[in-house]
Amino acid sequence: MNVKIKHQLRIFTLIAVIGAVAGLSGCATSGRADDLQAQLNTLSADVDAAKAEASAANARADEALGAANSAVNVANEANRRSMDTETKIDRMFKKAMHK
């Protein structure tokens, strides 16, 4: 009989511990869920801010590319004019040396 009471006491204690853990974890879980939702909202705001910054950086890169292309065109035109002038000077020099 003594063994039977000890066995019942162990079962009761085990049930009480399981109940306490389940009850406490339920409270902790809902609080943890609120914390996780707040972190998710913060991360979502950070992602939106990063997207906006990336979009602005992309627009600035497009402007820089346009400016670089314009500079290349100006440099090519200057090179063409330089070569034309060099050709004219070379012809004048040869004409002067021929006389």
Image (tube, rainbow, N blue to C red):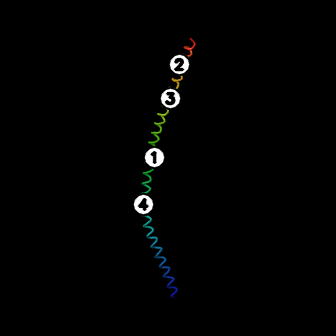
Disc 3 marks a residue whose amino acid type is Ala
Q: Label 3 vs label 2: CA separation?
A: 21 Å
Q: Which of the two marks, 3 or 4, is nearer to us in this view?
A: 3
Q: Is residue 12 positioned above or below 73 on the image?
A: below
Q: Secondary structure at mark 2?
A: helix
Disc 1 marks a residue whose amino acid type is Lys
Q: Which residue is mark 2?
A: 89
| Badge 2 or badge 1: first in the primary sequence | 1
Examine the image and state in which quarter residue 42 appears: bottom left
Q: Label 3 vs label 4: CA separation?
A: 59 Å
Q: Secondary structure at mark 3?
A: helix
Give how far across and how far down residue 20 sits, in percent: 44, 73
Crowd around label 4: few <14 · some 14–19 · many ≥20 (10 Å): few
Q: Which residue is mark 3?
A: 75
| Badge 3 or badge 4: first in the primary sequence | 4
Q: Which residue is mark 1?
A: 51
| Badge 1 or badge 4: first in the primary sequence | 4
Rendered residue at 45%/48% (across/down): 50
Give how far across and how far down residue 22 sits, in percent: 46, 70
Which mark identifies residue 35? Answer: 4
Q: Label 2 vs label 1: CA separation?
A: 56 Å
Residue toward you, 39 or 67: 67
Give how far across and how far down residue 59 sits, in percent: 45, 39
Q: Label 2 vs label 4: CA separation?
A: 79 Å
